[in-house]
């Protein structure tokens, strides 16, 4: 069979006819023989990728991978298609070359052929191995070594063609097929390569289309018409196609590079989108995972810098800048860690001067020691005043209105004590309104009523005796209270003041809206120093108007902190002593402030007193109850506590 093949080949002549095609080889192709089809024959319509329509002109990649170029423009695309068809058509025109040297010695010729084969001169060019093997077989058709040499060359050409196809060098493989088919038409490997070349035309067009889609930005979208989908379609049919695999790798690499550049520019949303697209190219790719880790590290580094800037802005009181930086941090941080804490810190800094609701503190005094213990009161809102149907309601307790505290404030945990006021008086040589006016009133045990007495001032208790240091200071006027807050402000550098009326009621109610802080009826347990029907004076006197079945054990003010604190952590808001607030007196709440500020009219002489005392009737202990008195009023039931701005 082989002998007949070689004789037939010789009878056809020895004209070399390797077509030039589209590159993929460094050899210049010889002119085609007369039987070759005209090079001006128009190309047939190119096949299209499954699921896509053929692009105008049927663009295809140039098959010489070494050049790294791709077709562009309708003219180039047409030329590529024509060359693909021409290269395929040239398969039937190949005729073998025979050695031009006479064969005097078969053995020597075999050695020369084997040397040429080892040096890579397989089938073309002067002194190629194939021409010498075929020349031997012309005269010695049964020479087994020459036949084996031809078999070996065909095997190597099969390998070369497979490699060329896997690298997308379609035309290089197409030029090898006619050689192999003429020599070994029944060889399974040759037939397989031939089929690959026939399919290669479609693959080449698909790869060119994928590149065109990628150049247009359609890397992974839209569905069914994107570069990645075409490459994957090729690999589904031809898993070893290196051109398609390389195309996917390049798409992924380009997207990773774009994602990294976007992250470096601070465009993290765009970076996330690009990285997500990269993950669609080759799902599970380690390269994408590594890039994601790098970008996360990059973002967390930027987030760390922003967190430092936010904390610095908060510390400097630049809350608007801190809010702006927090917005940037939300866009930058990949994990979102610490954002809620920073948001709370900004909110607390705005509302509570970086403190937190319920936190207690004492400011240092320049003269030594500490000021009163203060408690941070949370922001919020409440309905101030009493509803029209409340028992014992007074007209001046309405109309009810909503008050909202958008910024926190601090209230003293207890009423100002005798010891605290003494520190102020000693430091400033302050006498006080009672001392300057000659005295105050006291509870007279003999008459069972309040009676004026000279020589009484803040140093005395309700009965006129020397007061213990931990008792709430009494016999102090609104003027005295403000003198103390002014001194605290000077000593601490902070703004101390009397609370506003709305601040006092808000803190007194502590979240309740009932008649009393504890409910609507008489207390069922000891809640503070109130008038109870079980209370007894030193001479066993009792109250005529008092809470039923109530005995707190005190007649007169009790030491501060003697009873439980309310829900805001404050003591004696509803009893013990009534307290001055900053507001001027108004007969109703018409046009009252709704932001928690004090309602003050310049030059007013009447001020507001809030909260029940140890001697107040039950109706005067209600949460909405209010009294008025002149700024110079002093008595044994009246004291104060301080507030501080944050």
Image (cartoon, rainbow, N blue to C red):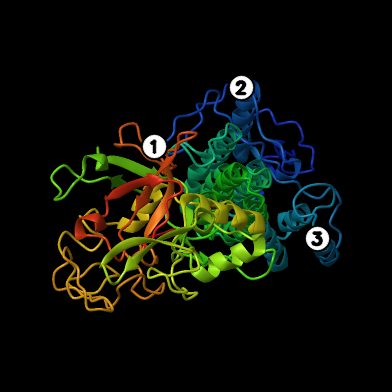
SS of the residue under disc 1:
loop
Q: Which of 368/426 is in front?
A: 426
Q: Residues within 10 Å of mark 2 (few under 14, many from 20)?
A: some
Q: Residue at x 36, y 70 (%)?
A: 557
Q: Residue at x 14, y 73 (%)?
A: 549
Q: Quadrant of residue 369?
A: bottom right
Mark in front: 3 vs 1? 1
SS of the residue under disc 3:
helix
Real-space CA distance between mark 1 and mark 2, rounded to the nearest whole angstrom: 79 Å
Q: Position of residue 610 (x, y in %)?
A: 34, 53
Q: Which mark is residue 632?
A: none
Give the mark nearest the N terminus, 3 or 2. 2
Q: Which mark is residue 113?
A: 3
Q: Is residue 445 visible?
A: yes
Q: Which of 230/147 is in front?
A: 230
Q: Quadrant of residue 406?
A: top left
Give the mark nearest the N terminus, 1 or 2. 2
Mark in front: 1 vs 2? 1
Q: Which residue is mark 1?
A: 593
Q: Position of residue 36 (x, y in %)?
A: 64, 30
Q: Are marks 3 and 2 in contact (CB under 8 Å)?
A: no
Q: Which of 330/419 is in front?
A: 419
- The vertical placement of 327 against 148, above or below, is above
**On the picture, is 112 further left or further right than 194?**
right
Real-space CA distance between mark 3 and mark 2, rounded to the nearest whole angstrom: 46 Å
**On the picture, is 585 further left or further right than 313?**
left
Q: Residue at x 23, y 63 (%)?
A: 518
Q: Which residue is mark 2?
A: 74
């Amino acid at each position: 069979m082989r002998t007949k093949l070689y004789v037939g080949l010789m009878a056809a002549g020895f004209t070399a006819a390797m077509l030039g095609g589209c590159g993929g080889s460094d050899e210049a192709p010889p002119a085609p023989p007369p039987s070759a089809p005209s090079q001006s024959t128009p190309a047939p319509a190119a096949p299209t990728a499954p699921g896509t329509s053929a692009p105008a002109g049927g663009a295809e990649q140039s098959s010489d991978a070494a050049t790294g170029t791709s077709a562009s423009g309708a003219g180039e695309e047409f030329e590529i298609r024509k060359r693909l068809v021409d290269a395929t058509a040239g398969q039937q025109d190949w005729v073998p070359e025979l050695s031009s040297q006479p064969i005097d010695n078969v053995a020597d010729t075999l050695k020369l052929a084997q040397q040429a084969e080892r040096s890579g001169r397989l089938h073309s060019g002067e002194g190629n191995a194939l021409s010498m093997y075929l020349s031997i077989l012309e005269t010695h058709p049964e020479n087994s070594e020459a036949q084996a040499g031809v078999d070996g060359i065909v095997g190597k050409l099969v390998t070369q063609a497979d490699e060329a196809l896997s690298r997308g060098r379609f035309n290089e493989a197409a030029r090898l097929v006619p050689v192999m088919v003429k020599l070994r038409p029944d060889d399974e490997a040759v037939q397989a390569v031939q089929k690959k070349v026939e399919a290669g035309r479609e693959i080449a067009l698909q790869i060119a289309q994928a590149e065109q889609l990628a150049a247009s930005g359609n890397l992974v979208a839209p569905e069914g018409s994107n570069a990645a989908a075409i490459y994957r379609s090729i690999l589904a049919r031809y898993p070893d196609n290196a051109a398609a695999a390389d195309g996917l790798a390049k798409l992924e690499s380009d997207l990773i590079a774009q994602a990294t550049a976007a992250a470096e520019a601070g465009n993290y949303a765009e970076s996330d989108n690009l990285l997500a697209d990269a993950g669609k190219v080759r799902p599970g790719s380690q390269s994408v995972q590594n890039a994601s880790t790098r970008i996360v590290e990059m973002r967390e580094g930027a987030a760390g810098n922003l967190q430092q800037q936010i904390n610095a802005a908060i510390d400097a009181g630049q809350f608007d800048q801190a809010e702006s930086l927090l917005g940037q941090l939300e866009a930058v941080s990949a994990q979102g860690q610490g954002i809620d804490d920073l948001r709370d810190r900004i909110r607390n800094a705005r509302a509570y001067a970086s403190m937190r609701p319920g936190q207690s503190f004492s400011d240092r005094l320049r003269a030594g020691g500490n000021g009163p213990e203060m408690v941070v009161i949370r922001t919020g809102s409440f309905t101030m005043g009493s509803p029209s149907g409340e028992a014992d309601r007074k007209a001046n307790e309405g109309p009810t209105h909503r008050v909202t505290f958008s910024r926190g404030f601090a209230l003293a945990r207890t009423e100002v004590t005798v010891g605290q006021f003494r520190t102020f008086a000693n430091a400033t040589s302050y006498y006080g309104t009672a001392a300057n006016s000659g005295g105050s009133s006291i509870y007279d045990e003999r008459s069972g009523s309040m009676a004026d007495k000279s020589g009484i001032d803040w140093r005395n208790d309700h009965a006129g005796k020397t007061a213990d240091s931990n008792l709430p200071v009494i016999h102090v006027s609104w003027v005295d209270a403000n003198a103390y807050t002014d001194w605290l402000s000077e000593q601490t550098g902070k703004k101390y003041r009397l609370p506003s009326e709305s601040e006092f009621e808000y803190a007194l109610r502590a979240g309740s809206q009932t008649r009393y802080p504890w409910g609507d009826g008489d207390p069922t347990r000891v809640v503070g120093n109130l008038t109870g029907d079980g209370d007894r004076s030193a001479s066993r006197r009792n109250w005529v108007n008092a809470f039923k079945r109530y005995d707190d054990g005190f007649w007169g003010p009790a030491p501060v902190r003697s009873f439980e604190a309310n829900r805001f952590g404050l003591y004696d808001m509803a009893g013990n002593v009534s307290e001055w607030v900053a507001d001027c007196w108004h007969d109703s709440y018409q046009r009252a402030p709704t932001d928690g500020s004090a309602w003050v009219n310049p030059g007013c002489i009447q001020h507001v007193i809030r909260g029940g005392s140890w001697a107040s009737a039950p109706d005067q202990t209600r949460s909405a109850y209010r009294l008025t008195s002149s700024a110079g009023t002093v008595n044994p039931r009246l004291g104060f506590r301080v507030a501080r701005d944050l």
